[in-house]
Amino acid sequence: MVDKSHLLTLGEKMYIESIELIRELVNNAYDADATKVYITISPEKILVEDDGSGMSRKGLEQFFTVGSEEKRIHTISPRFGRKRIGQFGIGKFAALSAADQFKVQSRKGKWIYEVIFDREDWQRDTIWELPISSRQATPLDCRGTKVILEKLKKKFNLSEVERYLKETIPLRAKKFSVYLNGKLITPKFVPGRTIPIDVKTLYGPIEGEIIIAVSPKLVDQPGIECRVKQVLIKREFFDLDKKPQPGLAKICGWVNADFLPITAGRNDFIQDSAEYKLFYQIMKKNLEKILKELRHQMEMRNLKKISRELREILNKIRQALILNPELLPSGRTITELRKRIGSRLMGSVIMPEVKETKIKEISVGKEAVREKLPSKEKKLLIELPKPQVIKKIRIKKLGISCGIVSLGEEGPEVISQGNMIYINQDHKIYQKLYSKKDLFNLHLLRLLSQEIVMMKKIRLPAREAFNWQSRLLTDAIT
């Protein structure tokens, strides 16, 4: 036996940490093959009743025995074959910290068995025995167990109780419903794509689902709920959240693996166990695959958006150039640009000086490239990547093309090669304005008008260039 003063202390401590009492009563109903549990909370009392198999005198004694071996010996419920959750039984004694009176009434066969706890009696009596009384059942006595807390000393917040129960009771189990003050408690539904997880291992099955939510705003707490016997132990990203990843905030869901060993505090797994290591590897691999697919989908949406925006911007630039034909770059200017700087820029970006210089042969030949590079400032030539999106505008015989490329966060905002304009999507300004449509469009207009003005003449005074760009921007925007 455990000293009753210790039980009271443990019960009060667990009550302070969580609403253990109600959770334990619901899980006991689940273990007893109940199909419905009704919880009623009012300022005066708390009532928890179920339609489970009920308890006899012996069952009540086991119910109040701390650390009873009953559920460890009989791990499967007789009617529905449920894997019993089983607990130490401390939560029931938390009732004495919440109320001055605690009643348990249960029907088993033709008999009603009842225990009434009274806090004053509990603390006053030197010798205390479990006060079990019995009587014959009447037609009005329903099957199952009823627990009543009266003379409440503490208040229970309904929203907190509901939130806690959603994490700690098997709401997804078949033929099991829980009602709180008449409202059915259900796992939160998150709109989005659901990916089922059903993996058979040598230790047992891993079952559940990973959800990619429509929006991160719909996810209260990102991460995969890892459960044992349908009870949440912890949320996990399996270390994939150690570095920022697009779409991670949209990931939620749950998996259940009854074979996982857990710590005594029931808030973590025994991570050096073989069972957990296998579980970790399987879940991480599944989540990596989902994130990879999600990144691809986001990239495709990004390409569609940029393609649409670029088409709109280039159309505005075209209209502005039609209004300002004197600003059109001549074909001769572009040809001259190609001759003068093509050997260094066509298909390349000039990067800062490096210790080991390598000169990439372009179309004009290796020696011609060397002649164009200053002997004291040799620089590395890097071939430009192929644009992810490319759009063209044609005015008379002039064709101007614009492409979106990745040149790195420290790369230039924009670069021109002949009549081709490359916009760097990695640049900080681009990334900052991408989600702000009006500002983003203005950003693209600024870069395009800047490069078109630079195409007009090989050398152009700064003031004149700014004036020309202002004219183009004004006519493109208005």
Image (spheres, rainbow, N blue to C red):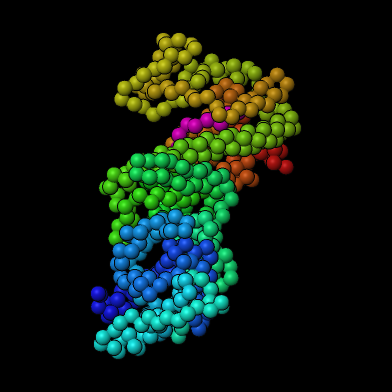
Q: Is residue 335 above or below residue 439?
A: above
Which residue: 52% across, 63% down? 35
Residue 53 x %, y %: 46, 66
Residue 319 x %, y %: 73, 33
Q: The N terminus lies in which quarter of the figure? A: bottom left
Hey, which residue is sitting farthest right in the picture?
323
Q: Is residue 66 above or below residue 449?
A: below
Q: Is residue 338 above or below residue 84?
A: above
Q: Is residue 198 left or right of residue 403?
A: left
* Residues in magenta, as a range: 402-409
In the rendered image, residue 132 lying in the magenta stretch gets the answer no
Which residue: 63% across, 41% down? 441
In the rendered image, residue 403 lying in the magenta stretch gets the answer yes
The number of numbered badges drawn on the structure is 0
Residue 220 x %, y %: 50, 57
Which residue: 40% across, 72% down? 56
Q: Quadrant of residue 265?
A: bottom left
Residue 433 x %, y %: 56, 44
Q: Quadrant of residue 277?
A: top left
**Residue 403 appearing in the image:** yes
Q: Is residue 104 left or right of residue 264?
A: right
Which residue: 25% across, 78% down? 3
